[in-house]
Amino acid sequence: MLGGNQRKGMVLTLGSTLLAILIGCATTGTSTTTRTTKRDKTATGAAIGAAAGAAIGLLRGEREADEILAHAAVGAGIGAGVGAYMDAQEEKLGHIPGTSVERISDDTLLIHFDSDILFSIDSASLSAGSKGSLDEIASVLNEYPKTAVVVQGYTDSTGTEEHNQDLSERRAQAVKNYLVIRGVDEVRMSALGFGESSPIASNSTESGRRMNRRVDILVKAKAK
């Protein structure tokens, strides 16, 4: 098991690598870049700014989505129209209360929930107030079935590492299970927990811990 300093070093290394890739792609004109649209409620360049904390989740989430998309059950690739396909979803997801949507690349979206909207502290039971937003997300996902959906759970550093890992996994699974109940095909979904390993803010303050207690949903399509 990695120690705290080793885990922090891994996060920072991956974050720096992702930052270099994103900047390189932006300067060479390739399509793998983060862009912000008028529908985004996050700060400009949020994916780059939070790279040190979010890199592990983003990279692992995309790998998981690629695994899902490799199976025929998800459907054939969208082809040259993948950008428009994701544009349409981004537009609809961006109007759901309690959430914001970030465009990671031409074929990938990342849905963020407002802090604490889904769960109470140290709980994996969905709050009553969160279900309206999840209902709307499920409706959009059902309308666009040719995407893989990866639910990603995170915690702050309060409590033991083992407890936080378990809690993050149970929270991600709870969101996935709810989406399945609302009709989203389980074959196209996966749930991952990252525990306390990927903070996007300082755990030394309550506001930082609130930001780190989060669930994101990565949505990815296949071009070919």
Image (cartoon, rainbow, N blue to C red):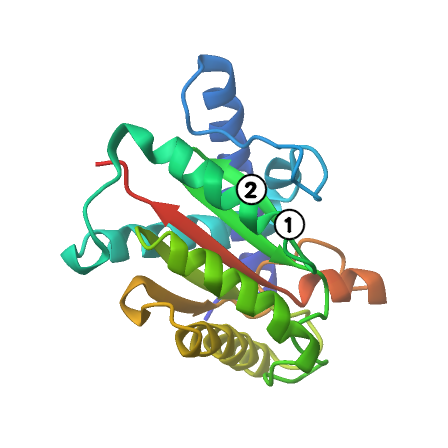
Mark 2 neighbour class, 10 Å CA radius: few under 14, some 14 to 19, many 20 or more: some
Residue 80 percent location from the top left of the image:
28, 28
Residue 118 percent location from the top left of the image:
65, 73
Compare residues 10 and 84 and report the one nearer the observer.
Answer: 84
Residue 210 in which image quadrant:
bottom right
Residue ranking furthest to the left? 72
Is 158 situated above or below 103? below
Tell whether 31 sits left or right of 50: left
Residue bearing the label numbered 1? 95
Is 107 situated above or below 157? above
Quadrant for the N terminus in the image: bottom left
Tell whether 22 sits left or right of 189: right
Residue bearing the label numbered 2? 91
* Residue 145, numbered label: none
Is 155 situated above or below 59? below
**Residue under the image location 67 percent in, 53 percent down:** 200
**Residue under the image location 27 percent in, 36 percent down:** 223
Tell me whether the residue at label 2 lies in contact with that at label 1, contact meaning CB atoms closer than 8 angstroms. Answer: yes
Kind of residue at badge 2: Glu
